[in-house]
Amino acid sequence: MRREGSALHGLGVVVLKELSDHLTSARMRVLEWLVVLVALAAVYAAITQIRDVTAQDPFLFLRLFTTARQPLPSFVAFLSFLVPLMAIGLGFDAVNSEHNRRTLSRVLSQPIYRDALLFGKFLAGLATLSVSLIVLWLLLIGLGLIMLGVPPGGEEVARAFIFLLVTIAYAGVWLALAMLFSVLFRSAATAALVTLGLWLFLTVIWPALSPALAEALVPSGDQATTIVAAQMLARLSPSTLFGEIVLAILHPTTRTLGPVYLSQLQGAVMGAPLPLSASIMVAWPQIVGLIAATILLFVGGYIAFQRQEVRA
Amino acid sequence: MSKPVIEANGLSKRYGTATAVDGVTFSVGEGEIFGLLGPNGAGKTTTILMLLGLSDISAGEASVFGHDPAREPLAVKRRVGYMPDSVGFYDNLTAADNLHYTARLMGIPAAERKQKIAEALSRVGLKDVAEKRVGAFSRGMRQRLALAEIVMKDARVAILDEPTNGLDPQASLELLDLIRALKASGVSVLLSSHLLDRVQSVCDRVALFNAGKIVLMGTVAELGRQVLGGGYAVEVEADGGRDVTKRLAALTGVRTVSEPSPGRWRLTCDRDLRGEAAAEVVAAGGRLKQLSLDQPSLENIYTRYFQSAAQPQEVSHAA
């Protein structure tokens, strides 16, 4: 049975409306402050540390992203928990708030499909997150320029830019997850709690649990097999994927994300950086994994939303 | 009756094994106000959602202006204005901004939007609060804002779900006036309600729902004849007089006479016998104090119908 008209009719209207809602909301104020404070803290920490230790790092600028100074975590570490929080904060009440405000049936009785509403909400959320992340990224680079006094090289900028894109994809995963739960749970508080719980589980517990699980599931005595299995399991968590991508992209010396066999090290110049294309190749499966997870979660939410009754 | 704008034919909705709407057939003519009446959970809202293409149809057919809502929902939704039960708006936006959003979803060209919104708001009497946030609106104002949306849409059919639900008497009278005004401007109206007496005054025809089925359909007068039987109930109050009961019963056209309390008689008759009854009482030497004819009220019809229904069923209040 073919539907008449485009499924995305009205998408632009929904995106603009949601975007203006996001940008004027109190949540956005909080996000903006978080962005500024995080950028300042990270740059301060990194720069004091870089001045102390590094004299001749060819990728000095990338150290801005990854250098930590106790007790502050590095910028990347900041982002790896700030981004999910921001995404969940924007997405957890996307659909159920329309139910609870009783606006859903009124909006859906206008000549648009449900597709446009859900997709529009997702795009608006992602756009809001992208804006925050781009601002954060530019702030960091600008502050770094001022305080380090060293201009970044072309490859550094390219790597930093890829890192930005990956972070947006990472935000997309959590946004899609939060929206899935906002469809499934009628109460916004339940949706927020479940999403946050799942985030904590995937970020903190799952990586610690996967070696034990691998040992239980893979009975072989071969240690390499168990390690690989544990890594595979750990990679089910988007946080693990993100961490690995960051490692490959921002540390150009990273040659592989799995276990290294001696045979692979033959002829390798230890500590020599890989070219950008090779670093991307190393992280490519992880990048694809993040995007695939976003699409899967969105499709899950989409199917649930299509089957849902609109009545309150 | 003129050409139907909404037609439902054997419309059914099943959730698993439960049947919410069971083979409902009705049609709404052009320029008519049609009422779906019944208790909460009788299937009124589900029927409406199916007509709008917002809920899948399990069996049967629906057609709105000749369009199938399941296959061509956009064509249906372009022509139909819908006011959901306890309608909601975005509280952080003003009344005008709320309408602005829906106007853009409707695809009203930018040049016309402003004027259409202003016209619609003034028609429902919300012109002065157009720039106020909806969060501060009373329930009655929200309902009127929802009507403004339908006006703005230039909808040919307005589907109103429980339009007077939760309104104070004044607000619901105003709303019913607005609904009459809609009809006067040529819009057909399908409305659902469980408040029978309120709705009786505006509906041209009604369908009584119970447990997912239409149990009665027609004009209020037709239903009255069908359910209340005699059609006309005359009440007489008088002082004194001899053999009044007997003499009233002897009138042609009177079916039964009862005397609920001394000095009060109730007649069921085939036609309006007020004049004859009054003459008879006076002729019997009584002093007539009051004479009245009961209009069949939906409330009466409804209660009577369900009282006489063989097995009274508990209606689940799922709403």
Image (tube, rainbow, N blue to C red):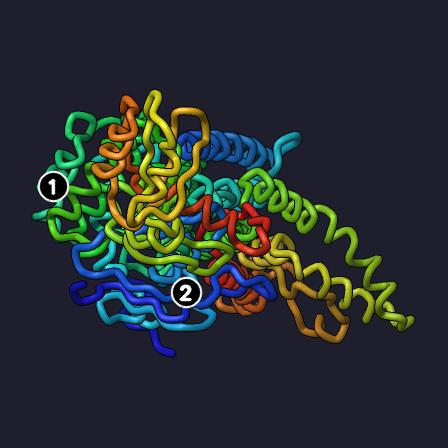
- Residue closer to the observer: A267 or A98: A98
Indicate which disc, 2 or 1, sits on the residue closer to the N terminus: 2
- Number of numbered callouts drawn: 2
Mark closer to the observer (2, 1): 2
- Residue closer to the observer: B108 or A244: B108
Q: Residue at x 84, y 67 (%)?
A: A217
Name the residue that disc number 1 marks. B114
Image location (x, y in percent) of residue A245: 57, 58
Please, what is the three-letter code of the amino acid marked with disc 1? Answer: Lys
The numbered mark 2 sits on a residue in which chain? B
Q: Quadrant of residue A73?
A: top right
Quarter placement of the N terminus of chain B: bottom left
Residue B24: give its label: 2
The answer to whether residue A295 is seen in the rendering is: no
Q: Residues within 10 Å of mark 1 (few under 14, many from 20)?
A: some
Image location (x, y in percent) of residue B99: 23, 41
Residue at disc 1, secondary structure = helix
Residue A25: give its label: none
Residue at mark 2 shares a chain with residue at mark 1: yes
Q: Quadrant of residue A132?
A: top left
Image location (x, y in percent) of residue A216: 87, 64
Residue at disc 2, secondary structure = strand
Q: Residues within 10 Å of mark 2 (few under 14, many from 20)?
A: many
Taking B135 as reference, is A267 above or below it?
Answer: below
The answer to whether A71 appears left or right of A111 in the picture is right
Taking B158 as reference, is A266 above or below it?
Answer: below
- Disc 2 versus disc 1: distance between alpha carbons? 41 Å
The numbered mark 1 sits on a residue in which chain? B
Please, what is the three-letter code of the amino acid marked with disc 2? Answer: Val
- Residue closer to the observer: A92 or A183: A183
Image location (x, y in percent) of residue A229: 77, 67
